[in-house]
Image (cartoon, helix red, strand yellow):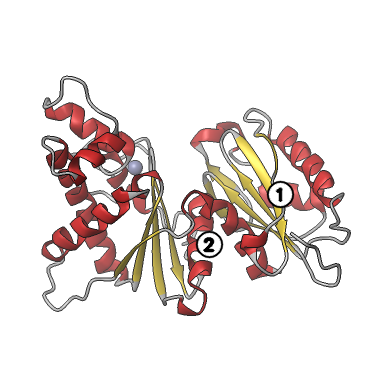
Amino acid sequence: MTINPKEKWFLGIDIGGQSFKIMACQDQVEKHSAFFTGPTAKHSFKDCITAIREKYDELREHGFKNQPSAIGVGFPGIVRSDGYIKECPNLAHWKGENLKVALEDALGAPVFIENDANCAALAEGYALRENLPHCLIFFAFGTGVGGGILFDGKVLHGRQGFGGEIGHISIESEGRLCNCGAKGCLETYFSTNGIHHTAQASGLFNEVPSVKDLFHGAIHGEQPAKSIVDQSIEYLATGLANICKIFDPDMIVLGGGLTQDQSGQYLIEQLHLHLPAKISFKSFELPSLKISQYQGRAGVLGTLVLAQQNG
Ligand SMILES: [Zn+2]
């Protein structure tokens, strides 16, 4: 990126379970600087803050002389808007720390924090720009299911930061045990782990193929892959129907590894087949179903969108 010293700039910090990335932008988030990365110190919150400070100093040597107007941070767990970390299975030692206070002390600029899936939702909203709908729901389907809900481009947090945890809506009251402790959460059925579980439990395979191969088989009409994938999509349709009846959203954006390449298109076709029957109201008009525009980059870009929204 070319830096205009007269324009303000924004910092994004994407904290993952294994590593963190920091980057800067000015007016357009897609035209951000190079990433400066380091390993996430899982066992020491303080060491990680120090490591982020070191990378921040390196980044500023590349022409970012002034302080950033705002810093956006993506975090892989439940965090309140005031920065208090409530829960994070990947960074269990960080529970109870205040990420906002620690980063503001270390970096000297205002910090705004969101759950990583909320950041990804912000990026998807940003991608739509003037066509941003009133209510946008974002799902990230990977080994688990992340989610974010935007109203007029702003994240719905709820009282304590659990707003948008739509991977954990229950679709089977006595269903599979989820990592969160509940039974029958959507992510135990429609995620790479969930679909793999369904394939294994079916007894239809001598050796259960990867979820990518199951989708490949389903797209080409091959059994038993198609029946496993379609059954999994039906579970997802149950979850989406619930979401539709709570929020009546304009748009649902589907992202994460399960929506890449041809799988995303197949998923949307199947949802159009299954969803109407799950939504009882005959006059209900389905929301627009879209595949993520930024895919794997959404969470990272969202930290910069968050900074821009607040700077
Ligand atoms: Zn759960």
Give residue 89's position: percent from left, percent from top.
49, 35
Near-viewer residue (253 or 291): 291
Q: Quadrant of the C terminus?
A: bottom right
Q: Helix, strand, or loop for circle 1?
A: loop
Q: Tell me which numbered mark, 2 or 1, is placed earlier along the sequence.
A: 1
Using the image, tell me which numbered label, if any, was put on residue 34: 1
Q: Helix, strand, or loop for circle 2?
A: helix
Q: Is residue 83 left or right of residue 61?
A: left
Using the image, tell me which numbered label, if any, was put on residue 230: none
Using the image, tell me which numbered label, if any, was put on residue 123: 2
Q: Amino acid at mark 2?
A: Ala
Q: Residue at x 38, y 41 (%)?
A: 144
Q: Is residue 199 left or right of residue 3?
A: left
The span from disc 2 to disc 1 (Cα, nearest Å) is 18 Å
Q: Is residue 255 left or right of residue 73?
A: left
- Residue 116 appears in the rendering: yes
